[in-house]
Image (cartoon, rainbow, N blue to C red):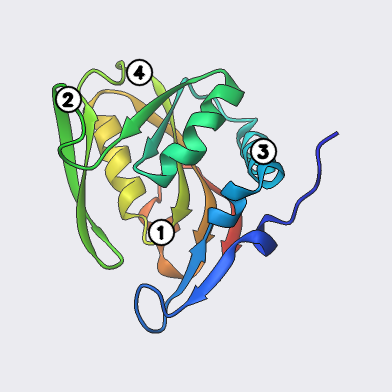
Amino acid sequence: MSLNIDLKNIIRSIPDFPEKGVIFRDITPILSDPAAFKFAIEELQRLTADLDFDIILGAESRGFIFGAPFAIACGKGFVPVRKPGKLPYEKISKSYDLEYGSSTLEIHADALRAGQKVLILDDLLATGGTARAIAELVSELGARVSAMAFVVELAGLGGREKCAGFETRSLIAYE
């Protein structure tokens, strides 16, 4: 029988980071607690149990932290979506806007097969820029997004709206 852990209570809230007026939701206390980390992976499995997907994509870097053990737990493969200059093989890239600037993500050109069903998994949904960029990379490779799943959602930042058209789920939401 699994424990029932209040993940929201474990997440550390840090005011005025990275700038004044922002409350940073720090997931590292979940990662350092083996029971909480295991519970988070189990809850992600529960959250996505009714979804049909073939493979999991996670964005650098915290998407890797949750995505890889989640993929193992689900018996699925995992594809890393990386920052520029980190992938050694032929790749495609997508630039996008963040809360505090812009960024670019890359994926190997052969990471997905046409028609493959993808679950995008990340630690945080904020403005939705990262998730949307990954969805566009998935589409460029001929695969399709089955859904997007997040550990934490910052509901007031409009990320869900930016992900409109995709099934979007989160374990924890902050207004």
Q: Identify the residue at horizontal 80%, vertical 48% (top origin).
A: 4
Question: From what the image shows, is residue 29 above or below residue 22?
Answer: above
At label 2, which amino acid type do we have? Pro
Residue identified by numbered label 3: 38
- Name the disc covering residue 115, or none: 4
Between discs 1 and 2, the one toward the N terminus: 2
16 lies above or below 71? below
How far separated are the C-alphas under marks 2 and 4? 25 Å
- Tag of residue 4: none
Q: Residue at x 64, y 33 (%)?
A: 45
Task: Give the Cα separation between the discs numbered 1 and 2.
Answer: 31 Å
> Where residue 128 sits in the image (x, y, percent)?
36, 55
* Residue 35, above or below 98: above
Image quarter hosting the C terminus:
bottom right
Distance CA(mark 3)–CA(mark 1): 26 Å
Q: Nearer the viewer, residue 170 or 79?
A: 79
Marks 1 and 4, how far apart at CA: 26 Å
> Closer to the camera: disc 4 or disc 3?
3
**Pointer 4 and pointer 3: residues touching (CB < 8 Å)?**
no
Residue at 30% from the left image edge and 35% from the top image edge: 81
Q: Secondary structure under badge 2?
A: loop
| Total numbered circles | 4
Q: CA distance from mark 4 to mark 3?
A: 31 Å
Residue designated by label 1: 159
Give left or right: position of 112 versus 155.
left
Label located before the other in sequence (1 or 4) = 4
Dot placed on the residue nearer the N-terminal end, 3 or 1: 3
Q: Mark 2 = which residue?
A: 88
Q: Within 10 angstroms of label 3, few (less than 14), some, or many (20 or more) residues?
A: some
Tell me the amino acid under the disc marked 1: Gly
The residue drawn where x is 39% and y is 50% is 163
